Image (spheres, helix red, strand yellow):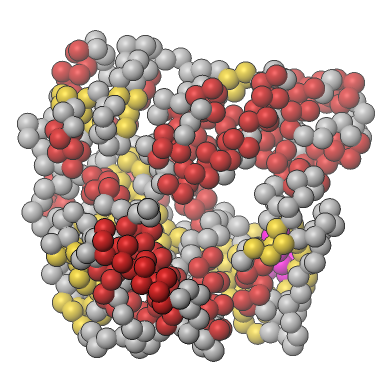
Amino acid sequence: MKTIKELEMLILKHKALYYSGRPVISDESYDEIEDNLRNLDPNNPVLSVVGSAQENEGKEKHDKKMLSLEKTYVIEEVIRWSKGEELVVLPKVDGMSCSIIYEDGIFVKAKTRGDGEFGENITSKVRWIADIPKKINFSGEIRGELYCSLENFLKLSGEMEKLKLPKPSSKRNIVAGLVSRKDYNHLSAFLSFFAFDYIDTEKTISMESLKLEKLKSEGFSIPEYEIICSNEEITSQEKKLSFLMDNQDILYDGLVFTVNNCKLHDEIGETIHHPKYKIAFKLRGESKTTTIKMINWFVSRNGVLTPVAQIEPVELSGAKIENVTLHNYGVIKQFNLKKGDKIEVVRSGEVIPKFIQVVSQKDGNFEIPDKCPSCEKEISKEEIRLICKNKECPERKLGSILHFVSTIGIEDLSEKRLREMLGVGLIKEIPDIYELKMEDLLKLEKTKEKLASKLFQNIQASKKTSLPKFLSSLGISGGAIGKCEKIVNAGFNTVDKILGMSIEDLIKVDGFAEKSATEFALSIKEKNELIKKLIKNGVEIIKEERGDALNGVSVVITGELSVNRKEFEKLVKKNGGIVSSSPGKETSYLICNEEDSSSSKYLKAKKLNVKIIKEDEFLNLYKLRI
């Protein structure tokens, strides 16, 4: 039996196809899906979604004004603003602010921000968005951002083409374009929603981070956030923003810092324009118009072909730019990109230069390769991507080896040297690196004994590594170093435990939803042989120096501590304990300094009979000192 969520998504999908005149299942089959949902949840709002024309909804007053944010482009200003308070930082999505109203737990209304006091009622559009829960466990107002991912933007473009509507020209403007249409409501199904705020009128939630966890527990997608407090942690966010803005699928345009302690929000106050307990940090962007000289295609380690435009050189943010990414085949097709087109390109800080939009075009149609530019094997079209599925493709192999070398940290082993090693047959796959001898390295061009010795020593030194770094180096789907650290800290701290993880185990780890957990689990199984070969060839996982006072102890923290929360979490992990984000049957303690908290973690812990203990009691019990 499918879940309520799966049935909701199926119904919305088939309604969209029906209203666009392209049904793919019979009326009887559709009625059966509706009946299944009706049996499970008779009052589900999705059952009442009808029509493809916008209702006459008009303007709606916000109960609490939707204010703008104060912005800065200087990270030092964020430090001065913070005044040493603990902060929550999350990525700022470039989309449209939206307010969702629930009554008796049922989604009843959606509004744009508008002028902050009055917004447009867009309920008939938002009902189509699959990742907005139609039922939750409380009443109130949820705020967040409507956005369109690159993948959905390109699918939407194809859908609009079939409906003989003008193709959208910009991912940045598409949300406003869709919600302002007077027809084709079903096109809003291509939009997504990140929730980032819950209007807590009763002031029952003490921390901004707890609001996010509450939203997550109700089924909302939330941006991945961090809790920080030191100046060093604030400064490091500038680099994080550059990494986020390199993301090709979601358009991020900054970071939002919020004072974590909600009790301070009223004290800090608001202006008529913005709340003073929040601030947005952005990177200065510069854009220029240039001309495409040529489009080259490159193969990634996953086999995806990426188009890169060689352009007439322009200077952006102090750097000479000669190449810009065109993202994927879908973008080439969408904008009919080709040699001679004038395009706008942008670069913010250290972010990779990107194509923004077409300024003017030459006559003719776009061209794409019919074979892989590396191995000349046939390529397949998979929605918005061209993919080479030949696992022996030289560029795919090189990409995987390069990723391993850079992540595991083998210094001086450049792409040029790796290409030469592959070319002369010294290596064929990643584990071969650890079978290289000094005499092998001396065979490389312009490599004498001193350099060969240095390379050999660097290779040997990289054999000893931490488990998170080792996992991240393997090229696992969704296996960025931060995610791997979370898995290890959750108790999967040996290779055997990693290989024995189930999807259900991963879903319990912070930052993993069902989809990302499934992708990671399947990907790690594919790497089984690679892991065994690397360990056989001498790779050794070095365990962190950890005490054992908290072995087998799992804790969840809620509310304020007398010390910085991150320092407290480090202490727990250093002594062998596990820190989780939400109480479960396996939780040993909920650490809470309040006598009777109203936080969702506290209430859940009580329901599960988890022992609730104060910070100083916990430290004394296990003889620990901060």
Quadrant location of the C terminus? top left
**Observer able to see residue 572:** no
Q: Position of residue 363 (x, y in %)?
A: 74, 88
- Is residue 306 inside the magenta stretch? yes
Q: Position of residue 429 (x, y in %)?
A: 77, 34
Q: Position of residue 459 (x, y in %)?
A: 73, 24
Q: Residue at x 42, y 15 (%)?
A: 546
Question: 395 and 228: which one is in front?
Answer: 395
Q: Quadrant of residue 282?
A: bottom left
Asked whether, in this view, residue 364 is left or right of residue 60, the answer is right
Asked whether, in this view, residue 349 is left or right of residue 64, the answer is right
Determine whether 586 is above or below 240 in the image: above
Q: Give the magenta range.
A: 305-314
The secondary structure making up most of the magenta span is strand
Q: Residue at x 67, y 67 (%)?
A: 329
Question: 396 and 438: which one is in front?
Answer: 396
Which residue occupies the extreme front position in the image? 28
Asked whether, in this view, residue 185 is left or right of residue 119, the answer is right
Q: Position of residue 195 (x, y in %)?
A: 31, 58
**Observer able to see residue 445:** yes
Q: Residue at x 85, y 35 (%)?
A: 421
- Is residue 71 inside the magenta stretch? no
Q: Residue at x 19, y 13 (%)?
A: 620
